[in-house]
Amino acid sequence: MPTASTSQILGFTESFEPITSNIYTRRVLSGEFQVVNKYLIDDLIELGMWDNELKDDIIRNNGSIQNIECIPKDIKKLYRTVWELSQRSLIDLSCDRSIFIDQSQSLNLYLKNPTMSKITSMHFYAWKKGLKTGIYYLRTQAASEAIKFTLDPINTKKRLLNDSLANDGENERSGEVVVGHPKKIKIEDAKIDIHDNEEILACNINDPEHCESCSA
C-alpha cells in the first residue's frame, strides 16, 4: 500500500483510498500545480466533451461531476469522489482485505457533516465486522470554500449571464414579476449596540472553564 509521499510521486491515491477530488491543487516545495483525474479526462476526450468550459465546471463544483448535466450517468457513477461514496461500503472493502493482512489498516473515513451518532455507528459497525482499526482519521470538509482563482473569467461571466437569463425566463413562465431593488439598510438604522455581548466576550476569573485562553 503506497504511503502519501510515494503515491504522490507515482500519481496514485494514498493507500487504498478512493479519490477525494477529480481536480485539485498539489502544493510542493517547488510550487503549486493542478492534478487532474487522468482516467476521467481520457473518457471525456473519447466522448468529445473535454474542453476548458467543462474543466471550469468541475473546478466550480470542487472536483465533483455529479451536478454537471452534460456528463452521462455512467461516467458520473464511475468517477464519484470519496465524499459521494457510502462509508459503509468502504468499511466492507476494508473488512474483505483484512483477512490477507497480518496487522491492521489505516482506514480513513469521510463525512461532510459528521455527527456523534454517525461516528458511533461507523465505529460499532467496523468493530462488529472484525476490523482492528475502526477508524484512523475522520476527514471532514472545510466550512468555507476556497476562492477559485484558476477559473476562466470569460467562461464564468458567460455562465452567470446564462443563469441570469434562465432565471428571468422561469420568472416569466411562473407569472412572477420582480420590481425594483432590495431595500438597502443603513448602518444607523440597524441600531447595533457594541456593548450587547460585553459580558459574554469578557473573561471572568471566577469562571475560567468558559474561557478558551484560561482553560488552555
Image (cartoon, rainbow, N blue to C red):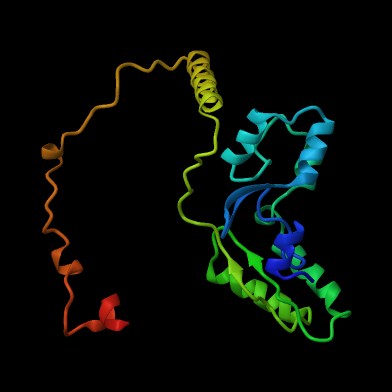
Q: Quadrant of residue 41?
A: top right
Q: Position of residue 113 (x, y in %)?
A: 54, 59
Numbered label tally: 0
Q: Is residue 149 visible?
A: yes
User: What residue is rendered at 19% in x and 68% in y?
Assistant: 200
State left or right for residue 23 relative to residue 112: right
Q: In what quadrant of the picture does the C terminus appear? A: bottom left
Q: Position of residue 78 (x, y in %)?
A: 80, 47
Q: Residue furthest front?
A: 30
State left or right for residue 62 relative to residue 164: right
Q: Position of residue 103 (x, y in %)?
A: 79, 86
Q: In what quadrant of the picture does the N terminus appear? A: bottom right
Q: Which one is nearer the viewer's eye here, 65 or 12?
A: 12
User: What residue is rendered at 84% in x and 32% in y?
Assistant: 46
Q: Which one is nearer the viewer's eye here, 160 or 112?
A: 160
Q: Which one is nearer the viewer's eye here, 60 or 69?
A: 60
Q: Residue furthest right?
A: 100
Q: Is residue 101 above or below residue 174?
A: below
Q: Position of residue 84 (x, y in %)?
A: 68, 52
State left or right for residue 23 relative to residue 203: right
User: What residue is rendered at 82% in x and 30% in y?
Assistant: 47
Q: Is residue 192 above or below residue 53?
A: below
